[in-house]
Amino acid sequence: MSKYDELLDRAFSKLPVLSEEKVDFKIPPADCIIQGNKTLLKNISQMANIARRSPEEIGKYLTKELAAPVSISEQGLVINAKVQSASLNDKIRKYFETYIICKECHKPDTHVEHTDRGYILIVCEACGARYTVKNY
Ligand SMILES: [Zn+2]
């Protein structure tokens, strides 16, 4: 675990318990199947829609997290590794928590902005929060 991840974990653990009203956003579970030495994530486009990111952006993140190349096919996202659904769901949850769900209002209505100084900003369209992330 990197130092940054530790900081993030700490930040999350300090968040107040979410009220019922705020937890209506559900991270979509991975619909995936292992095929030989590969894993097919069938609902990548659904996830991309919910996250409001491109399948390529999610694929890029998973490549890094799983240390395996990915490609996009008509069937979904093909990961060149055997990945159990529990571990894939874990990565996807982390992706949503880090890059999609606003740390202030906990809504998934965010987008990414690249600043000219090389920072990457997550901007929340629901509450206006802006914060930088690394390694997007
Ligand atoms: Zn927000």
Image (cartoon, rainbow, N blue to C red):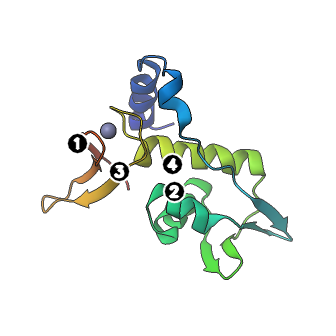
Image location (x, y in percent) of residue 11: 39, 25
Is 84 left or right of 136, judged from the image as shown?
Answer: right
Is 30 left or right of 25, judged from the image as shown?
Answer: right
What kind of element bears circle 3?
strand
- Which-is-in-front pick, marks 4 and 2? 2
- Which-is-in-front pick, marks 4 and 1? 1
Instruction: Count residues near mark 1 (Cα–Cα under 10 Å), then give few for <14, some for 14-19, many for 20+.
Output: some
Q: Which residue is mark 2?
A: 50
Hey, what amino acid is under mark 2?
Answer: Ile
Real-space Cα separation, disc 1 to disc 2, in angstroms: 19 Å
Q: Which residue is mark 1?
A: 128
Real-space Cα separation, disc 4 to disc 3, in angstroms: 13 Å
Image location (x, y in percent) of residue 33: 81, 63
Real-space Cα separation, disc 4 to disc 2, in angstroms: 12 Å
Hey, what amino acid is under mark 1?
Answer: Gly
Q: Earlier in the sequence, mark 4 or mark 3?
A: 4
Q: Earlier in the sequence, mark 4 or mark 1?
A: 4
Q: Is mark 1 within 8 Å of ligand 1?
A: yes
Q: Which residue is mark 3?
A: 110
Q: Is mark 4 within 8 Å of ligand 1?
A: no
Q: Earlier in the sequence, mark 1 or mark 2?
A: 2
Q: Which residue is mark 4?
A: 95
Image location (x, y in percent) of residue 88: 68, 51
Q: Is mark 3 within 8 Å of ligand 1?
A: yes
Instruction: Count residues near mark 4 (Cα–Cα under 10 Å), then give few for <14, some for 14-19, many for 20+.
Output: some
What kind of element bears circle 4?
helix
Is 16 drawn above or below residue 109 in the view shown? Answer: above
Q: What residue is rendered at 49% in x and 71% in y?
A: 56
Hey, what amino acid is under mark 4?
Answer: Tyr
Is 74 drawn above or below residue 83 in the view shown? Answer: below
